[in-house]
Amino acid sequence: MIRASFKGGRKFRSIIPSRKQYSIRLASSKMAELERFAEENNLNAEIVLTIFDDEDNSVLFRESFSVGEGISNNLLFLVSRTLDTTFKDSPQEEKDALLQMLSKAMEEEAVEQECNKKLFSVPNLGFFKGRKKNELDPKAAEAERARQAEEKARQEAAEAERARQAEEKARQEAAEAERARQAEEKARQEAAEAERARQAEEEARQEAAEAERARQAEEKARQEAAEAERARQAEEEARQEAAEAERARQAEEKARQEAAEAERARQAEEKARQEAAEAERARQAEEEARQEAAEAERARQAEEKARQEAAEAERARQAEEIVEENKKGKPAAAVKTHLSNGFSKGIAFLKKQKQYVPDRKNKREIHPPIVAQESAAMRDLEKQLKMAKIELIEEIKKEKLELDKKLAKEKKKEDKHKKALAKRRKRMAAPGLGSSKLILFAILLIIGVQVYFNVESGNSPLTVPGWVIDIGNKVSNLVASYKKL
């Protein structure tokens, strides 16, 4: 026999106790009662319906349904809807067999309930209660039995008729249900067809939209490719312009470097020429000083020669006088002259050798026998020699002083020239403080103007143009060249 059970929904246990089995008809009425209870109490729940055969405990159907939505108040409709939606891929014969089995179970249960109602009605109970009273009269009992048999036959015929009518009604209901199911199935199929048509149309629309989007994407990609190509060409052109500018800058830098090299070479040549001129002037000054010293030496030598010639003449004169004296018989004068000449030579020799000069006041020394007149003459001669020596020394000192004055004058002139040259080099090596401030102010002014134009044009404020870098390089090269000088 086919039975049904419910599981779930604690709030509905008063209507469907757990682990209780129901007949198909009672289960359908329980579902209607659950819907009414849920609507009255504004409840919602998920209930699991299980239909099985209690002879072999095989599950025929199991599905969960929602209570409180007003669509699950009939078991057959629930099973039919579930089979058409959830189990739409199952064979149609199996689904029809299950629905027919459930309909038959509901009809059999309806006939059984009708028979039980008639069997246990009140008149029958009265018949059983008054049976003992009529058993005493045999004829009455026989008539009663005949009447009861007739009544029973009539009832059986009525029961059979009602059963036939109930069966016919059940068959009609099943047919109605089948027609309703078929109509619903047809409507479902039509709805499915309409849905498929709508889906096909929607799919076609989506495909058209996809094609349109693909076309737009392709067009956009083509435009982006064109934009990228234009950007690449612009970038390539900018790169070429930058390369041209870089080559021009490099050429300009090379020309600047060559000009700087030429300038440095010219400055080095000029410096070498100046140094050569300085060396030539120094050499000429030295040559002039040497010539002046040679002239002074020649003058001194000439004077010395003249002095020697005068001394020779004096000696010759003295010799002549000695000869005359000798002729006259006066050897004392000759001896005096000879002694004076010898004494002068001895003094000169001792002066050169820086040796001891004998003390003539020492009486213990041995002297030749010279008379007092000769001693006085010798003293006079020695005085004259000393005076001549002093005069000669004075002349030599005077000549040396003049030569020193000339050398000092030349040295002073050379020092003055060197100081002027060093001052000129120092002035050319670096600009003055005022010019440095002016150059710094000009550079800062140029940088400020360039930053303003960069901000106005939307570029980075610290973007420095090439001509500013070139000016800075020129200034640095100029300062470096001045420092090298």
Image (cartoon, grey):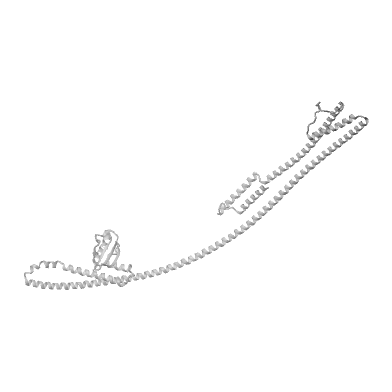
Q: In this view, does 67 lie above or below 358?
A: below
Specify the quadrant of the image occupied by residue 113.
bottom left
The residue lying toward the viewer, choosing from 224 and 412, is: 412
Q: In this view, does 407 lie to the left or right of 442?
A: right
Q: Quick one: quadrant of the N terminus?
A: bottom left
The residue lying toward the viewer, choosing from 372 and 458, is: 372
Q: Is residue 256 left or right of residue 290?
A: left
The x, y position of residue 96, in whole percent, is: 29, 71
The x, y position of residue 345, in whole percent, is: 83, 34
The x, y position of residue 420, in whole percent, is: 71, 43
Specify the quadrant of the image occupied by residue 145.
bottom left
Specify the quadrant of the image occupied by residue 172.
bottom left
Residue beneath the point at 23% across and 70% down: 107
The residue lying toward the viewer, choosing from 69 and 370, is: 370
Q: In this view, does 49 lie above or below 360?
A: below
Q: Is residue 303 left or right of residue 89?
A: right
Residue beneath the point at 88% across and 34% down: 315
Residue beneath the point at 61% across and 57% down: 246
Q: In this view, does 191 lie to the left or right of 395?
A: left
Residue 75 seen: yes
